[in-house]
Structure formats: C-alpha cells, structure tokens
Image: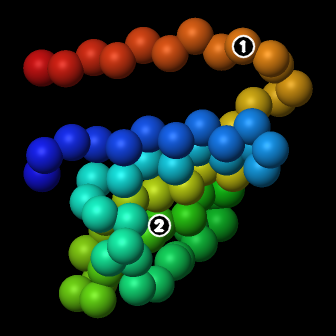
C-alpha cells in the first residue's frame, strides 16, 4: 500500500477512506451502523464510507497519527 486516501464530502456529509485504488471497487456492503465497506473482486476490504459524518459543524479539526 503506497498511501491512504481520505475524502470528506461536505455535500453528501460522508467520509471515504481508501486503502487501495477506488477503481478496484467491485461491491459495497452495509454494516448497519452507517458504515459501508468497499470491497474488491476477492472480497477484500479496500475502503469504507462513513455516512452522516458531521452534525452540522462547519470546521472539524483533523489529527493524523502514524506509528
């Protein structure tokens, strides 16, 4: 994995996190907790989408931690 993509979409109020190329998405699976898993043809999770991310806040601080 070269990089992780993080996309906050204010219009749809979602957060997308990709661990692999989004073009490889083959199927999506809802978890029932406002999370959608994005999977490739091998049923491997390559990303996820968090629905209803922001409760109407304009700016949200983001902290990135690496270990």
| Residue found farthest to the bottom | 41
Could you tell me which residue is drawn at 72 percent across and 13 percent down? 59
Residue occupied by mark 2: 37
User: In this rendering, which labeled residue sits more in front, label 2 or label 1?
Assistant: 1
In whole angstroms, how far apart are the C-alphas of marks 2 and 1? 26 Å
Q: How is the image coloured?
A: rainbow
Q: Nearer the viewer, residue 19 or 67?
A: 19
User: Mark 2 or mark 1: which comes first in sequence?
Assistant: 2
Q: Residue at x 46, y 57 (%)?
A: 48
Give neighbour class at mark 1: few <14, some 14-19, many 20+ (Cα, 10 Å): few
Contact between marks 2 and 1 (CB within 8 A): the answer is: no
Q: Residue furthest right?
A: 56
- In this picture, residue 38 sits left or right of residue 16: left
Is 14 rendered above or below residue 39?
above
**Circle 2 crowding by C-alpha within 10 Å: few under 14, some 14–19, many from 20:** some
On the picture, is 66 further left or further right than 18? left
Where residue 39 sits: x, y (%)?
37, 75
Residue 62 on image: x %, y %:
50, 15
Residue 7, compared with residue 27, is above or below; it is: above
The residue that mark 1 highlights is 59
Q: Is residue 50 above or below residue 54?
A: below
Q: Could one spot residue 39 in this view of the protein?
A: no
Q: Position of residue 15 (x, y in %)?
A: 58, 43
For the residue pair 10 and 64, the one nearer the viewer reads as: 10
């Amino acid at each position: 994995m070269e990089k992780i993509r993080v996309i906050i979409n204010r219009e749809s109020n979602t957060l997308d996190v990709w661990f692999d190329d989004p073009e490889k998405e083959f199927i999506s699976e809802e978890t029932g907790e406002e999370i959608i898993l994005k999977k490739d043809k091998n049923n491997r999770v390559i990303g996820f989408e968090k629905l209803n991310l922001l409760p109407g806040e304009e700016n949200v601080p983001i902290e990135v931690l690496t270990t």
